[in-house]
Image (cartoon, helix red, strand yellow):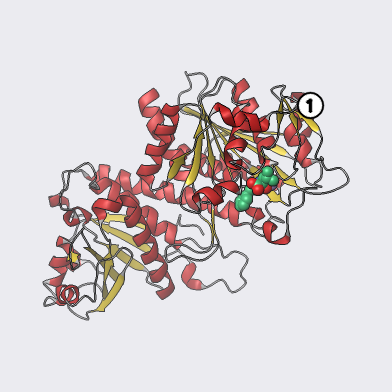
Amino acid sequence: MATEELDLRLISEPPTEIACDALVVSAGRPKGSQQARLSSAAQLVDSRLDGLLQESCIRGEVKGNSGEITTFYVPGRLAARQVIVLGLGDLERDGPRTLRRACATLARQLQEKGAKRVALALDVTSLQPEPGSPQSLTLLAALQAQVEGFLFGLYRFSRYRSHNPREYETAGRELLLQVGMAQTAYDRSTLAAAVQKGRIMAEATNFARDLVNEPPNVLTPGELARRARHLAETWDLACTVLERPQMEELGMGGLLAVSRGSSELPYLAIVRYRGAPEQAGGLALVGKGITFDSGGLSLKSADGMTAMKGDMAGAAAVLGAMQAIARLKPALNVTALVPTTENMPDGHSYRPGDILRIMNGKTIEIVNTDAEGRLILADAMSYASREGLSPIIDVATLTGGIVIALGHVYTGLFSNDPRLSAELIAAGEAVGEKLWLLPLDEEYEEQIKSEVADIKQTGGRPASSITAAKVLEHFAGSASWAHLDIAGTSFVDSPKPYQEKGATGVAVRTLAEFAMRHAATHG
Ligand code: BES
Ligand code: MN
Ligand code: ZN
């Protein structure tokens, strides 16, 4: 759902004077405390309410746990129609992640109630025992996280519902962010930039969620390529889409083979952002764009196929990140490469036993046509490497094994460069996305040795996510490279208080934040 028409504003009037449908103040639950603690802004509001909020804390009705929402109707006492106390838990421990989720939960509840004009006076700094300590949340990070969470929470994928509920519309809605200007050292434009960054990050995330949630009969490889082109036109980026004849010329044996069983044509969409035109090379973002993964001849079970429209979440993450990058304008060059096709069974399908030649000349012995992602990524990475791009970061719903290893909490991270993986983990931490580094030791190479080709496509069940990454490593050339396996984190099967069932948009914010930091340190 589009939030572009949502009116987002910074205001500095005292919370008691804000006319709105819902005034939201906060309560924390610092480590070891028996009872919720009201923020300074909440206490100010409480002084108009004869201590009603404080009493609710003492009685334990308001506990201050993260995401807790307690509503008070207080006619005549304040300019606001209702006051909401939003629990933020232990901010010192959980940082922006908990704030983002709490604001998303809040947005979902208020949306259902149809509140139009919402004011957040969360006053996060007053809830932290040691503001200014390394773990503490700055006002800027807090503003950004609030906006990200709120807009993330407003997201609904409702375009195919005939009775599209009115309350899901964002037109005519206002989100006011209250900051006591006297209490802060930041000037208005710095604060506004943090709000804008939050908006950009959230809208890019929601853009990626839309791509993943689209059904596979609509989001075909051709349609994904069109959306990449449209993204480029909207944000003034360059775009080239390679078609089959060019792939044949370039020798993209992986992408071509995977596409053969499908009646849809394959594409390689290349989107370029030039933030440092005088520099050569730059960052490459490669996203797996399988618009539907049936497994091919090594057909999946019916159950195993149900979520496979989401097998292009890597492509969506990369395109979402490009949108954010185009708007945030870091001083570096970024190239997104999105190989896209379906993986289907047919008389033309590629087979177990086939030997394919990838664009960089290496040959792969096919074992299982369901391990298609690494083949299309291999061609796109070869292309990026031949262009001299570095680092190369690929994002893919690559293996079921990563779901077994890390569940739905951590994205799997693999890299041939410890500095790059450290930068990615730090970027992820800043935006509330968890990455866990897994090993790529030489010993794993044994599992993908082939007797008939340069490498074997798969290494069997042990450490299957690692051996998949080992295959990819062969196509990075001399580039510094990292691989994000998002098979466990790109999709949620059941609704959560802070998000609806479906796509999460994972990795968009990590990649965009990485690009910003990389430009600042390597520019
Ligand atoms: N797209 C799947 C991986 C996947 C699984 C994504 C579950 C999201 C949820 C991938 O193409 C695949 O099928 N991988 C196989 C490879 C195996 C056959 C070697 C796997 O990991 O099971
Ligand atoms: Mn597969
Ligand atoms: Zn797949």
Instruction: Locate residue 502: give its quadrant.
Output: bottom right
What is the tally of numbered marks visible in this picture? 1
Tell me the residue at 69%/55% (across/down): 216
Q: Position of residue 154 (x, y in %)?
A: 44, 62
Identify the residue shown where x is 53% and y is 63%: 501
Asked whether, in this view, residue 400 is left or right of residue 244, the answer is left
Which is more toward the observer, 100 or 462? 462
Q: Position of residue 2 (x, y in %)?
A: 50, 57
Vertical placement of residue 449 versus 183, above or below: above
Residue at (62%, 21%) from the top-left corner?
Answer: 386
Describe the element under mark 1 as helix, strand or loop: loop
Horizontal side of 247 relative to 146 (left or right) equals right
Left or right of residue 48, residue 475 in this image: right
Q: Residue 176, located in which quarter of the rendered image?
A: bottom left
Q: Which residue is mark 1?
A: 452
Position of residue 23 measured from the top left corner of the image (x, y, whole percent): 26, 68
Crowd class of label 1 (few under 14; some 14 to 19; many from 20; radius 10 Å): few
Q: Would you say residue 237 is visible in this rendering?
A: yes
Compared to residue 44, the image places residue 390 above or below, namely: above
- Which one is in front, 368 or 289? 368
**Percent coordinates x, y for residue 101 in the rendering:** 37, 58
Q: Quadrant of residue 314?
A: top right
The C terminus: image quadrant: top left
Residue at figure coordinates x 55%, y 62% from the top left: 493
Give amino acid for label 1.
Answer: Val
Residue 327 appears in the rendering: no
Classify mark 1 as within 8 Å of ligand 1 or not, answering yes or no. no
